[in-house]
Amino acid sequence: MNRVAHNKSRQVRPVVAFGLVLLLAIGLALDAVPLWLGIAYAAMGLLSLAFYFTDKTAAQAGTWRVPEMQLHGLDLCCGIVGGLLGQALFRHKTSKPGFVRMTWLIAGLHSFGLIGLLLIHVKPG
């Protein structure tokens, strides 16, 4: 990926994170998303962000790293907003094609899940 495309890709992450937070907020406001799920997104997002920071710091220091599977696991378990923000803020893991693909897959799953909860809640007619 060339430098311009790489920078644009990194800039999209906060927008997608905001979109997920917006879907979550709408879902909570409409009572389509349970409160516990909103709390899980907040807690896991902060935890994921902290792990991305820890891994970036470790990478720069040449010390023990957080396994990629663990970062993706946190993102999958409601931490995707923190993961996307961590990648953008710390410029971390954004140039590894396999990691990036998995991140977008996880973000897509969360988007579809939240949209699904909203659609189930909205009754036609």
Image: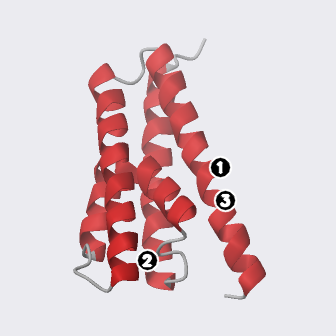
Mark 1 element type: helix
Q: Amino acid at mark 3?
A: Val
Give coordinates of residue 77: x percent, y percent.
28, 50
Give coordinates of residue 7: x percent, y percent.
70, 72
Image quarter in which the C terminus is found? top right
Image quarter in which the N terminus is found? bottom right
Where is 121 relative to 97, above or below? above
> Going from the N terminus, do you reach mark 1 or mark 2 first?
1
Which residue does the numbered mark 1 point to in the structure image? 15
Where is 76 relative to 123, above or below? below
Q: Residues within 10 Å of mark 3 (few under 14, many from 20)?
A: few
Q: Amino acid at mark 1?
A: Val
Disc 3 and disc 1: Cα gap in Å? 5 Å
Q: Are marks 3 and 2 in contact (CB under 8 Å)?
A: no
Question: Which of the two residues, 119 or 105, is positioned nearer the viewer here?
Answer: 105
Is residue 78 something that shows in the picture?
Answer: no
Query: Which residue shows up at 30% across the image and 75% down it?
Result: 68
Which residue does the numbered mark 3 point to in the structure image? 12
Query: Which residue shows up at 49% across the image and 15% down it?
Result: 29
Is residue 111 something that shows in the picture?
Answer: yes
